[in-house]
Image (cartoon, rainbow, N blue to C red):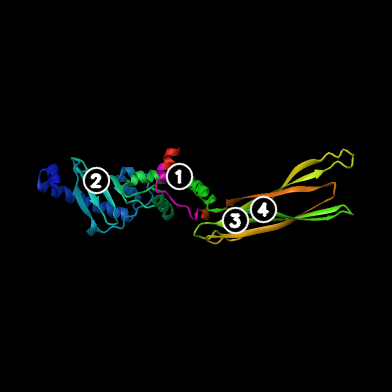
Amino acid sequence: MAIAALAVCGMMTACNNSNNQVRDFAISAAKKFSSNQVDSIRAIYPGAEKIDSFALDFNPDSLDVEKTEAPNTFKVRFSQNADMVVEMTEDGKMTVKESRGLFAYPADRMDLAKKTGQWNSSITDLEFSKRMEDTMFPSWIQSKMADAMKSLVKITKSNVSKKHISDYWTSSEKDVCTYTIEVSNETDQEIGGNDYTISAIETWKYFEDGWADLSFRETTKRQSSSKMLTGKPIPPKGSVTYSWNRSFEGSHHFGYKDFDVNATVNFTSNKASFGYKFTGKEYEEYQNSK
C-alpha cells in the first residue's frame, strides 16, 4: 500500500479492515451486476437509475481494492477493465459513486460510439449513459454519412445523344434521343442495387414558328420528364451505366430541341455508410452544433 494511502487511513489495521469491508461489499455488488439484479443495484448505486443491463462477468479472484486520497473513498477494480468508486460513511454504510465499464449497451450503438469518439475508457458509465440516451446523435451522424457519400458515390456521366431523321418532302421529322447515366462507386465495398436510386430529369423545348397564323414568330416552351433508376449493384471502385431512348416527332414548323438530362443519387438504406471515415471527434462536433 502506498504511503499516501496509509496517511489517509492512519493505521495499517484500520486500512486493512476498511479494505476488507469494501471488498466484501464489492463482491456482493459484483454478483448483483453479473446476474443483472437491476433493482438491488440501484439501491447501492443511486446514479444507475436509468440503466437496463450490466456487462460484468464476475470473477472474485480478479477483484482488487485500493484506498484513494479522498476520505473514506475506495477504488475497486474488476476484470474486463471495469472499475467502480465506493464511498463509506462513518457508520460503515457503502454506496457506489461512479463506475467505468459496468454497463452494457447494444453492440451497434457501442461500435458507433467508439468510432465517433462518443466513448472512451476515461468516461464514467453515468456520463456515457447520458450520451447513449441522445436520440439525435445517430441521425446527425447519418446526415454526415450521406454528405460524405455524395462525393464517393456520384454521377460521373450524364448526357444525351440525338439522331435526327427528316423527310423534307413530307415535312416529317423525328429526333431519337439516347439518354445515358453513369454512376461511380469510389468506396471499397459494393453498393447494392436496392441501396440507392437515381433521379433523372429530362428537359427539352417545344417550339412553333407561327406558320399557321402567318406570324412566323417562334415560340418555345420548356418541358420535362422524370425517371427513377435503380437495381444495378455498383462494384467497389467501379461503375454502372443506365441508358434509355425517347422519340420526339415534329415537322419543319413545330418540334423539339435543346435536349438535356440531369441526375442525382439518393440512398435508400443505412448501408450507404460504406466508405465513410469517422474523424474520432463526431460527438464533440455534434454537441457544439446544437
What is the spatial separation of the Cα atoms under label 4 and label 1, in whole angstroms?
A: 39 Å
Local secondary structure at mark 4? strand
Residue 279 painted magenta: yes
Of badges 4 and 3, nearer the viewer stands 4
Q: Which residue is mark 4?
A: 159
Do the residues bearing badges 1 and 3 touch, measured as CB atoms within 8 Å?
no
Find the distance from the CA under tag 2 to the CA under tag 4.
Answer: 69 Å
The residue pinned by badge 1 equals: 137
Cα separation, mark 4 vs mark 3, equals 12 Å
Dominant SS in magenta = loop
Q: CA distance from mark 2 to mark 1?
A: 32 Å
Q: Nearer the viewer, mark 2 or mark 1?
A: 1
Q: Earlier in the sequence, mark 1 or mark 3?
A: 1
Q: Residue at x 12, y 43 (%)?
A: 7
The tag on residue 183 is 3
Say which amino acid is labelled 1.
Phe
Name the residue that disc number 2 marks.
86
